[in-house]
Amino acid sequence: MFGRKPILDGVSARGLLLTLGLSSLGLLGLLATNDGGGGVNQLAWYALAAPAIGCLGGKLGLRFWPLGFVAPALWMGAYSVSTASSMQAAPTPFYAALVWTGLFAAGWAGGVSVLRRGWGGPGWLLLLSAGAAGLSALVALFGQSPPQSVVAFALDLSPVTCVMESAGLDWMRHASIYELAGSLAPDARTPYRGMLAGPLCLVVGWGLVMVVEGRARRRPNVQPTTDLLTES
């Protein structure tokens, strides 16, 4: 229609099954929804796991469009269903979904760019995400009164902080970091605004995917990982 290819043109049943398998890894966050805080643990898992799961998709040689949007969309649906009866659900989870979609896309780009360098990438990305999320607590261990600018910067680097605040949650007053954040002056840092952070993360992540997938298509000697697995 209108001379354009159908959205699912070239998407195989095998690709869909692999995509659903990747989506199920993110749905493990449903196991942590009984936190009494409107699915906070579920959001935290999405923030931590999105880059690593996206990296798996890139390494499997799947097409980001449209398959790369399946997992983040399913996670959003799972969050909405699991918190439907909660009075403490996030006010703006849609913006948080844009953030984790951008993180997922960035990980996907990493998987494509290191297509033939083993399967350690997803694990390293998961460790990197966890390290960035725990950096603020690590900074606090270095002294009784770490500089406020350092603590604020560590909080800003955390993907969990970005997802939580984009979802409209008062992350600075959450029990997990209240003792640390409570020592910060009100003007020590500006919370992420979902209306800006969400679209920005999505555009940056998708842009990275477009760049690396374009380069991969121009390298005919690079064989998709799925083909390599089939031949072996």
Image (spheres, helix red, strand yellow):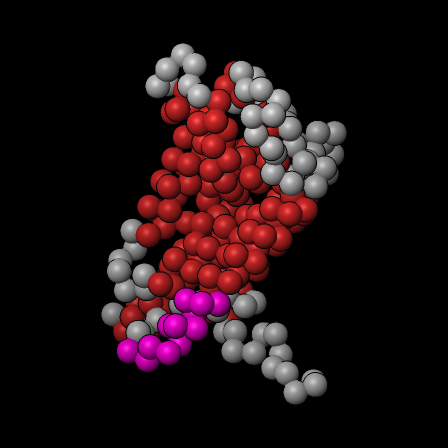
- Which x, y percent locates residue 151? 46, 26
- Which x, y percent locates residue 26? 51, 47
In the drawing, does residue 175 fall left or right of residue 77? Answer: left
The correct choice, above or below, for 26 with respect to 210 in the image is: above
- Which x, y percent locates residue 228? 29, 70
Q: Residue at x 32, y 80 (%)?
A: 220
The correct choice, above or below, for 69 with respect to 81 in the image is: below
Give the residue furthest to the top. 144
The correct choice, above or below, for 160 with respect to 53 in the image is: above
Q: Is residue 213 magenta?
A: yes
In the drawing, does residue 229 fall left or right of residue 82? Answer: left
- Which x, y percent locates residue 85? 74, 34
In the drawing, does residue 196 fall left or right of residue 159? Answer: right
Tell which of 143 and 10 is nearer to you: 143
Identify the main secondary structure in magenta: helix
Quadrant (top left/top right/bottom left/bottom right) for the N terminus? bottom right
Quadrant (top left/top right/bottom left/bottom right) for the C terminus? bottom left
Residue 189 visible (yes or no): yes
Q: Residue at x 36, y 50 (%)?
A: 122
Q: Residue at x 56, y 25 (%)?
A: 188
Q: Is residue 5 magenta?
A: no
In the drawing, does residue 215 fall left or right of residue 156? Answer: left
Q: Residue at x 31, y 74 (%)?
A: 223
Tell which of 14 and 197 is nearer to you: 197
Which residues make up the magenta segment?
A: 210-221
Tell which of 128 and 29 is nearer to you: 128
Residue 166: which quarter of the image? top right
The correct choice, above or below, for 189 with respect to 62 in the image is: above
Residue 60 visible (yes or no): no
Give the residue furthest to the bottom. 3
Residue 194: which quarter of the image? top right
Residue 96: which quarter of the image? top right
